[in-house]
Image (cartoon, rainbow, N blue to C red):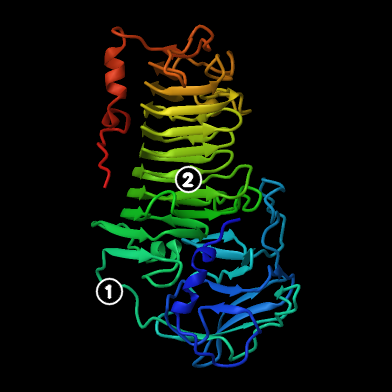
């Protein structure tokens, strides 16, 4: 598993390292003991000579140095999740009264890992928003929390690891901030910057993410006019291990299984970074729920339902990779010059509500597993309404590879389902070598558009404003 701090381990020496007391031999600490100007969203990182092992007992405790007040505690005897490896039940179990490791992310509770170990790095994830500006904190770590085969760790005693946070955060009225895992920018984590970003702002706020691997679970809601931009999708990555087993449904009614998600937002753009869900199963890389969402030059790597959409979105020059039902589409989405790769099963389960458009792909490419279809509408054991009789997916000048000759389906049959209003349409579809696809075996529910008879339909569906309810996207 990739680690953020692995990319910045060489930066530890940039932070003041005046020691305030004894510490575990040969175990480096970040922030360094005595460090100043630390971000309030910092992770704590211990670097060992050998790969450490996480224990099942002991506490990590953070105290305010001024009055010895405890501001955060991580108790390693508490399990991370009912399915810490993401391989258990995906159903809600409201009778389970067990306490699990819980963090409040963007106002919603998620199960999370208090420590993640990769290679020689043990990254400690404090609960969000516990640290404040212009305070000095002391960290203690019980010996049971981590162990190393070379015996180099026996805990961190009181007084040996302190650091002081920045005097203040971004200036009032700031419209641009930067995230860097090394702690040398405004924020160390993307979630920290998102928590800072104003809600329902009338003016644009930009969050720049410097190169690195940011292993954090992202969720925010009710933000507007927000641009989140990495350096490139090859150098800036956000990832987390999450799925419907690790974070099963709860009574809040919010999907907790994506690595990155947002709800109730308007005018949000994500550009130039990658998002990866490190678990398999029902595991979105990204769930979007809002109006006028733009994705530009993004790389999304999830599993089942790798991208779930609500609202309206414009996706351009981006790549989506998933394991089947790779698009779970409730929203109106215009895809431009983008690629979708499905390693197993259907490309999409398109669940378009009546009165809006669905997934429209123009000048895109789709690659399946050889048996993949473009979209399905199976019996969902809920009657006609649950089978989405107004589902829409339209392909215009799209390249397809390893897609079943039938193209579409399965689609539930009458009398349970009336497919007369389903729009599974395609125009100018070609194979990987640029040859026209043979439509002769296409599912009879689908329709193959032709010229000149369907030129007006093709013209309309080639216009993002037509698909997206009158919105003409602008990519910043």
Residue situated in front as seen by the camera: 33 or 447: 33
Please determine whether, in this image, residue 202 is positioned above or below residue 127.
above
**Residue 77 picture location, percent across and down:** 73, 71
Instruction: Name the quadrant of the N terminus.
Output: bottom right
Residue at 30%, 17% (x, y): give it: 457
Residue 168 lies left or right of residue 375; in this view the side is left
Is residue 390 visible in this depiction of the protein?
no
Please determine whether, in this image, residue 158 is positioned above or below residue 375.
below
Badge 1 crowding class, 10 Å Cα cut-off, few under 14, some 14 to 19, many 20 or more, is few
Which element carries disc 2, helix, strand or loop?
strand
Residue 269 lies left or right of residue 159; in this view the side is left
| Residue at mark 2 to residue at mark 1: CA–CA distance | 31 Å
Badge 2 crowding class, 10 Å Cα cut-off, few under 14, some 14 to 19, many 20 or more, is many
Residue 140 lies left or right of residue 394; in this view the side is right
Residue at 41%, 66% (x, y): give it: 180
Q: Which residue is mark 1?
A: 171
**Residue 104 picture location, percent across and down:** 52, 64
Which element carries disc 1, helix, strand or loop?
loop
Residue situated in front as seen by the camera: 434 or 253: 434
**Residue 473 picture location, percent across and down:** 27, 39
Displayed quadrant of residue 412: top right
Q: Earlier in the sequence, mark 2 or mark 1?
A: 1
Give yes or no for contact between labels 2 and 1 (Cβ–Cβ under 8 Å).
no
Residue situated in front as seen by the camera: 202 or 305: 305
Residue situated in front as seen by the camera: 137 or 370: 370
Is residue 297 visible in this depiction of the protein?
yes
**Residue 383 picture location, percent across and down:** 59, 25
Q: Which residue is mark 2?
A: 287
The count of marks equals 2
Residue at 63%, 87% (x, y): give it: 23
Q: Which mark is residue 36?
A: none
């Amino acid at each position: 598993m990739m680690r953020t701090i692995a990319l910045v381990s060489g930066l530890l020496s940039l932070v003041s390292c005046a020691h305030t007391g004894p510490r575990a031999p040969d175990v480096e600490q970040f922030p360094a003991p005595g460090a100043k100007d630390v971000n309030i969203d910092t992770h704590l990182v211990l670097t060992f000579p050998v790969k450490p092992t996480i224990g099942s007992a002991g506490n990590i405790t953070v105290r305010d140095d001024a009055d010895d007040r405890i501001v955060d505690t991580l108790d390693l005897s508490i399990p991370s999740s009912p399915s810490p490896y993401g391989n258990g039940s995906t159903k809600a179990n409201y009778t389970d009264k067990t306490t699990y490791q819980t963090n409040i992310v963007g106002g919603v509770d998620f199960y999370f890992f208090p420590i993640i170990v990769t290679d020689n790095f043990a990254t400690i994830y404090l609960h969000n928003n516990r640290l404040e500006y212009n305070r000095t904190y002391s960290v203690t770590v019980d010996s049971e929390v981590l162990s190393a085969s070379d015996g180099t760790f026996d805990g961190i005693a009181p007084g040996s690891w302190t650091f002081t946070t920045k005097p203040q955060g971004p200036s009032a009225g700031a419209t641009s901030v930067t995230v860097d895992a090394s702690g040398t920018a405004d924020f160390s984590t993307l979630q920290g910057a998102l928590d800072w970003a104003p809600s329902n702002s009338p003016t644009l706020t930009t969050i720049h993410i410097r190169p690195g691997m940011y292993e954090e679970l992202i969720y925010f809601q009710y933000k507007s006019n927000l641009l989140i931009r990495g350096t490139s999708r090859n150098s800036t990555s956000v990832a987390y291990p999450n799925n419907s087993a690790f974070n099963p449904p709860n009574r809040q009614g919010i999907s907790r299984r994506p690595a990155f998600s947002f709800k109730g937002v308007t005018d949000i753009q994500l550009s130039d970074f990658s998002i990866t869900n490190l678990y398999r199963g029902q595991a979105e890389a990204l769930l979007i729920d809002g109006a006028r969402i733009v994705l530009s030059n993004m790389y999304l790597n999830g599993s089942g339902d790798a991208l779930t959409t609500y609202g309206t979105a414009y996706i351009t020059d981006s790549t989506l990779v998933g394991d089947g039902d790779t698009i779970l589409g409730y929203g109106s989405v215009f895809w431009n010059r983008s690629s979708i790769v499905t390693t197993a099963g259907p490309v999409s389960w398109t669940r378009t509500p009546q009165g809006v458009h669905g997934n429209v792909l123009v000048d895109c490419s789709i690659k399946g597993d050889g048996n993949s279809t473009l979209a399905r509408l199976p019996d969902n054991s809920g009657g006609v309404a649950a089978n989405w009789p107004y589902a829409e997916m339209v392909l215009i000048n799209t390249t397809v590879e390893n897609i079943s000759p039938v193209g579409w389906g399965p689609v539930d049959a009458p009398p349970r389902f009336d497919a007369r209003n389903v729009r599974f349409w395609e125009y100018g579809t070609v194979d990987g070598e640029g040859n026209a696809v043979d439509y002769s075996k296409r599912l009879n529910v689908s329709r193959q558009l032709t010229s000149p008879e369907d030129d007006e339909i093709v013209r309309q569906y080639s216009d993002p404003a037509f698909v997206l309810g009158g919105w003409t996207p602008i990519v910043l």
